[in-house]
Image (cartoon, coloured by chain):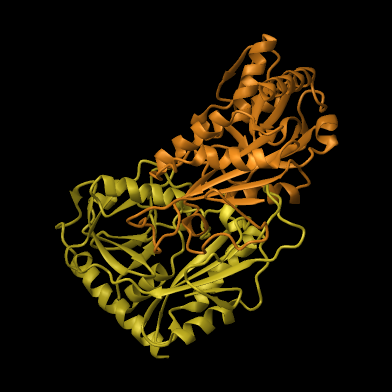
Chain colours: A yellow, B orange
């Protein structure tokens, strides 16, 4: 199901103008959210992150934004959904200059949340380090723009190398994030995740995992992490809204810890699952 | 006028699916070309650059691509047109993984070529150095993807600073390019333009200007150029398909050379204009 500026549309389309700046220039932002039982997990946090991104890009925030998310999710009813919210600067005249009057395009796309392959939890997944770097000094570092071309290219490169996903280093050589998920590294003493200074997106699940670690009494922090630290770690995992926590067991063919999902990762999956269930009940 | 996969559509739209990966992930490429008298300037070079980009992204090249450009341009007839060719990976199921069967979306958008403001040629334009950097080590460096969000953000930042455009430095601090045009610097001895190793796009006009310099007997080359060299230059200018050669007279408020369009720039505008006219007559 597709909703555009609050109106439902058939899934097949067409839905948007070919002159929409989201299509021509990636001039927009998005959020991928998880909904269940008619509510979106941490909707406030997603909308706050989006608002910040809109302010950075100077795109006016449509006042109905929250309603335009809540209505389709409510209409979808129970069940487990992935909700993609896209906001663009709308139709433009060509070139980089925005039109005099900006009318943003807001798209909500609802789909059944895809099942996470069982082997991801049981065996963990593998990454290779991407041949290209993440730009921690980009104009749009830290906001979730539509510009995912590099992520797609890195993901395809990883598939060709026989891995599940790619891990980006930033231009300074620090670990940043995977193509569409955040990285966590457990040294045996500290759980760490790269800071936004490394070009890592401030993930909503990443934040919830930091909360879950606190619940378990595990010291957790944002910290620079180089590749050697990751390779020498006891455990590692990736986080995203749609997959939650997924163990990371190999990097460039080298095993992390025992090369199997670790004990702390398993505990955090439990704590995070409980947290999601608890927030959905409220 | 909008043509999609060879078929004409009303300009107003909607034209494309909200699930098109060009809209959701900037998963595609584009070319902006100049047409006049029914022919596109250096169409072969534009299509070659696009082909290379499609190969990098692993998007299959539609065999009818050239016809899909030539037909609308022929139909538009005489006059001076800007032709935007966009190719995306088409509709996808969500997430970064492409669909099993990729059916690219090809959009041709024709519009009257916007007049270059007279003051650009007469007085030259001004840039500020963007606060963010261009990533010369990106997965997609050197190909013209849809991911122009950083360019838009830098352009808006420049407008707020009272400048016409923004100039990107790469992550090493070398001059790269402006938001949608290449940079040339004249030292008084050599005409230089940043190489692709600095994240500069291999512009079609840039190439034609190197040809024009050869015609004039001016030594011209790709070379690393730092900001101090640009600030100390005798002349500088920007190049793009729609604007051609535009003098650059100020960077961060500091005058380049005399702070007015230079003599070599003027000669190159003449040689380039003659080159375009000559190639269109053929």
Q: Position of residue A191 (x, y in %)?
A: 31, 64
Residue B73 seen in render: yes
The reply, left or right, for residue B178 in relation to residue A280 is right
Going by the picture, which residue comes out furthest to the top? B217
Q: Position of residue B229 (x, y in %)?
A: 65, 24
Residue A46 or residue B8, whichever sits in front: B8
The quarter of the picture where the C terminus of chain A appears is bottom left
Badge count: 0
Q: Which residue occupies 54% across, 64% down?
A: A14
Residue B77 vertical placement versus B212 (above, below): below
Residue A174 vertical placement versus A27 (above, below): above
Residue B276 or residue B23, whichever sits in front: B276
The reply, left or right, for residue A115 in relation to residue B171 is left
Q: Which residue occupies 53% across, 84% down?
A: A71
Q: Position of residue B239 (x, y in %)?
A: 67, 31
Residue B232 vertical placement versus A246 (above, below): above
The reply, left or right, for residue A187 in relation to residue B39 is left
């Amino acid at each position: 199901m597709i909703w555009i500026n609050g109106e439902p549309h058939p899934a097949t389309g067409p839905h948007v103008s070919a002159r929409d700046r989201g299509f021509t220039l990636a001039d927009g932002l998005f959020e991928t959210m998880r909904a269940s039982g008619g509510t979106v997990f941490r909707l406030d946090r997603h909308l706050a992150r989006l608002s910040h991104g809109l302010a950075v890009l100077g795109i006016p925030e449509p006042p109905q934004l929250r309603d335009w998310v809540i209505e389709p999710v409510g209409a979808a009813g129970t069940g487990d959904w992935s909700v993609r919210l896209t906001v663009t600067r709308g139709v433009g005249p060509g070139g980089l200059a925005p039109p005099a009057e900006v009318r943003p395009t807001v798209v909500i796309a609802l789909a059944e949340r895809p099942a996470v392959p069982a082997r991801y939890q049981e065996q963990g997944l593998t990454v290779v380090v991407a041949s290209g770097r993440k730009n921690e000094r980009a104009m749009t570092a830290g906001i979730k723009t539509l510009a995912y071309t590099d992520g797609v290219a890195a993901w395809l490169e990883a598939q060709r190398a026989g891995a599940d996903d790619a891990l980006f280093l930033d231009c300074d050589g620090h670990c940043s994030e995977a193509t569409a998920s955040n990285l966590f590294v457990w040294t045996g003493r500290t759980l760490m995740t790269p800071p936004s200074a490394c070009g890592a997106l401030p993930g909503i699940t990443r934040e919830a995992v930091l909360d879950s670690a606190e619940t378990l009494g595990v010291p957790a922090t944002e910290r620079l992490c180089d590749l050697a630290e990751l390779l020498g770690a006891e455990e590692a995992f990736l986080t995203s809204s749609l997959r939650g926590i997924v163990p990371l067991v190999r990097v460039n063919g080298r095993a992390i810890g025992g090369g199997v999902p670790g004990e702390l990762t398993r505990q955090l999956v439990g704590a995070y699952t409980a947290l999601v269930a608890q927030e959905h009940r409220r």
